[in-house]
Amino acid sequence: MKRIFFTIIALLAINNIVFSQDIITKKSGEDIQTKVLEISHSEVKYKLYSNQEGPTYTLLKSDILMVRYENGTKDIFDEVKESNPISTSTSTSSAEDMRMKGQIDSKLNYKGRRSGAGWTSAITILTSPVLGVIPAAVFSSIEPSEKNLNFPDAELMKNYDYNQAYVKEAHKAKKKKVWISYAGSSATWLLLLFLL
């Protein structure tokens, strides 16, 4: 009974360590694991999550796509004005604008359901991390199916640039979800092996 209790406590502690940081996504696509300190009118001040005693860094809001906080909330810094939505029938926006919108919409709408993360986790825990890498590699190499993309507007998906950016960003999120699942399951398997 004590082993089960300590296993649950250890898993909860690992979960808090893995998921308790803010993530700044730059417009270049780079993710930075941080602890956000302050958001002003034109910039964001933060410390690197891996070195919270280190220097304070500053990024301009114009270079940031989104900030995901440790509690799950998001701030999106989009320069597109909400009062002037993009019309697909009379689109005057450039291909780059459509790609940017596709990336943003994908991050907001694609949830990664049926990504294979559950199967990867189950196989890894029931067999071993050595065998668990096989489904992780297979599931992460397959693009999400169209029915799982959860795109907000069928008309926008007809735009080639928007579609490609949306699918690419969703595939990136799927890969991340599968490999995080594999890593967590491998840690759980090793912990169970150690405790039992």
Image (spheres, rainbow, N blue to C red):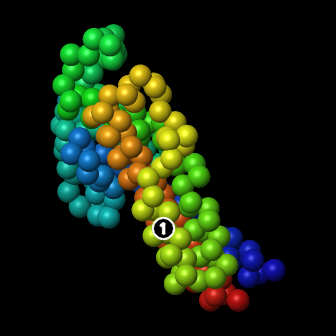
What x and y, as percent, mark residue 124? 59, 76
Q: Position of residue 116 (x, y in %)?
A: 56, 60
Of 118 and 27, the residue lying toward us: 118
Residue 62 percent coordinates (x, y) = 19, 33
Kind of residue indicated by mark 1: Val
Q: Say above or below: 115 vs 91.
A: below
Q: Name the residue located 74 percent from the left edge and 82 percent from the top edge.
A: 3
Residue 45 vertical placement versus 91 (above, below): below
Residue depicted at 37% across the width and 28% down the height: 158
Residue occupying the point 30% across, 52% down: 31
Residue 82, horizontal then vertical, whole percent: 34, 16
Instruction: Identify the image quadrant of residue 15.
Output: bottom right
Disc 1 is placed on an element classified as: helix
Between 76 and 167, the residue placed more toward the observer is: 167
Query: Relative to residue 111, is residue 156 drawn left or right?
Result: left
The residue at which mark 1 appears reads as 138
- In which quadrant will I find the C terminus? bottom right
User: In the displayed image of the protein, which residue is found farthest to the right?
Assistant: 1
